[in-house]
Image: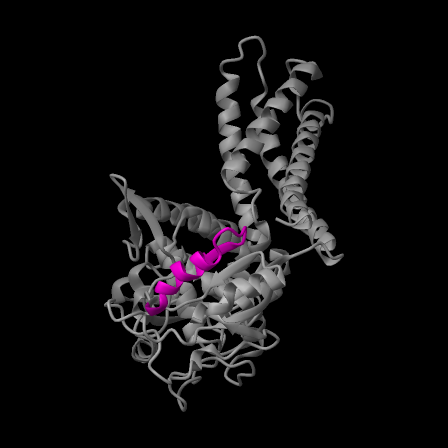
Amino acid sequence: MPESKQRRELLEPTVYLAIDAVVLVGSFLLTYWLRFHSGLILVPLGIPPLGPYLLASLVIVLVFLAIFYGQGLYSARGGRRVERDFVELFRGVVLGSLLVLALTFFVRAMTFSRWFFGLFFWISWVGLCVGRVAARRVLARILHRGLRRTRLLLVGSNPMRERMLRTMRELPGLALEPIGWLRVIGEADPGPSRAAPPLLAAGEPPAAEDPPPDLPCLGEVGDVREVVEARAVDRVVLTLRFDQLPLITRVAASLANLTTEVQWVPDLSELHTSKLRLREVAGIPFISVREVALSGADRIVKRTCDLVVSAVALVALSPLLAAIAVAVALTSRGPVIYRQARVGRDGREFTMAKFRTMRLDAEAQSGPVWAQVVDSRVTPLGRHLRRWSLDELPQFWNVLRGDMSLVGPRPERRVFVEQFSLEMPRYFERHRVKSGLTGWAQVNGLRGNTSIEDRTLYDLHYVENWSLWLDLRILLMTVHHVLRGENAY
C-alpha cells in the first residue's frame, strides 16, 4: 500500500478520535462549572471536589470512545451524511450515559450528582455534533490540498455504476478517484461445459456500457492486471450484471499476488431490493433479499414514538395552529382544513388533513393534477404555508389517530397510485408500512414534481431498512430541509 494512502487512512480516524476526546473532556468541565459554580442550579450539599470528577471524566472518555468505535464512527465517514453521524452520536451518548450511570452505583466512596449527568448528556451530544462538522471541514481541507485519493478501476457496467459515480461526485469526502473502466467484451461464452447463460450474445454491442463523461475506457476485462500495475490502481470495483458473475473469480485470479482490493457492486434493482443482508444459520451463510417490513416489536416501538411525539407536537404547536387557521379563514373563501382521501398501508384509504392552500374550485377544470412551481390555484397565503411546509401540520392529528406515522412514504391519491403502479411494478410496495408526515425520499430532495421512479426507490429503501435511528435521522434532516424550502410548492 502506498505510504500516502496509509497516511490518509490513518488521518481520518485520528482526527475524529482526537476531536471527540477533546469535546468530551471539555463538555465534562463545562458541565461541572454549570452544575456547581455557575449559580444557575442550587447546590444544597455543597460543591464536591474536582479531583474525583476529573478521574471520572477519564473513565467516561474511554467508555464513550469505545462505544463510538463499536458503532463504526471512526471508519470511512466521508460517504455518510452528517445527519447520520448526529443520530449515531446520539445513540452512542445514550448508551454511554446509561453505562456510566450504572457504574456509579458501584462507586460507594463518592456520590455523583444525577443533575450533572443529565446536563452532561445534552452538552456532550451537542458538542460532539459540532465537533463532527468541524472534523469534516478539517479533513476536506486536507484532501483538497492534494492528499492522495484511492484510485479506482471500474470493470463492466450495471445500473449501480452510474449511481456510484454520481455519489462520488456529490461526496468528495469519500476521497475516491475513478481513473477509468474496462469493457466486458469477448466473454460471450463461459465455456461449453457450463450451464450459465451467455454474458453477451455474439456480436451484440454492449449498449449499457457507454462510458460516462470523463471516464476513459482503458481496455477490456482481460487487461485488468496490466492496467492495475500500469496505473497504480488501489481498488478494482466490479459493476457486473448477475449473468456476468463468473468474471468475479476470473478478475480475482488475474490480480493474484497483488495488494489491490477487489469489490463487487451488485445490481440491487435487478434483485428488486435495496439492500442485501448476510445471515448465518448453523454456520451456513444466507443472503436475505426480502424480509418483513416491520416486525411486531418494531411496530409497537414506532407507534409509541408516533403517539408521544404527535401528542406533544399538537399541544406545543396549538398557538401556531390557531394563528394559521385564522389567517386562512380571513384571506380566502372556503374551509380552513382541507380533507382528501389518500392511500395508506396495505392500500387502505384514509382522510388526510391539511390547511387549505388552494381555491375551492382548484381542480374543477383540470381534474387531479400535480402541483407546479408556478401554480395559479394556490392562494397568496398558501404559497407561504407550502414554502415552510406549515400546511402539513394538521397531519399530526392523522399520526395521533394511527392513519399515518411520523416517518414513512408520503401518501398519494388513488388515481395517482393506480397510474404509478402501472408504470412501476414495485410502486405499491411502498404501502407495506404506514404513510408518513415526512420520508426518506423527501429529505433527499425528492419533493414536489420530481422523479416518481427515484422517489419510489428511496421509499423502498426506507421500507426495507427501517430502524428507530433511521426515523430519528430523517426527522433531523426534515428540519434542515424545511428551513431550506427545497421543492416546496
Q: Where does the image place residue 373, in percent across and percent down from the top left?
A: 55, 80
Residue 261 covered by magenta stretch? yes
Q: Where does the image place residue 316, in percent across and percent down from the top left?
A: 51, 50
- Does 49 sit above or below residue 354? above
Q: Is residue 113 left or right of residue 253?
A: right
For the residue pair 345 and 137, the one nearer the viewer reads as 137
Residue 97, can we see it? yes
Kindly give the residue lying farthest to the bottom in the view shown.
365
- Does 74 sit above or below residue 155? above
Kindly give the residue lying farthest to the right in the view shown.
145
Q: Measuring 43% from the left and 85% from the top, which residue is drawn there?
A: 361
Q: Is residue 215 left or right of residue 139?
A: left
Q: How is the image coloured?
A: one colour
For the residue pair 458 and 274, the one nearer the viewer reads as 274
Residue 486 covered by magenta stretch? no
Check the picture and name the quadrant holding the C terminus: bottom right
Q: Measuring 68% from the left and 42% from the top, which residue is drawn there?
A: 15
Start-end of magenta stretch: 243-265
Kindly give the residue lying farthest to the top in the view shown.
109
Snapshot quadrant of residue 267: bottom left
Q: Measuring 53% from the left and 18% from the top, which residue is drawn there?
A: 104
Q: Is residue 340 left or right of residue 72?
A: left
Q: Where does the image place residue 140, in percent across and percent down from the top left?
A: 70, 54
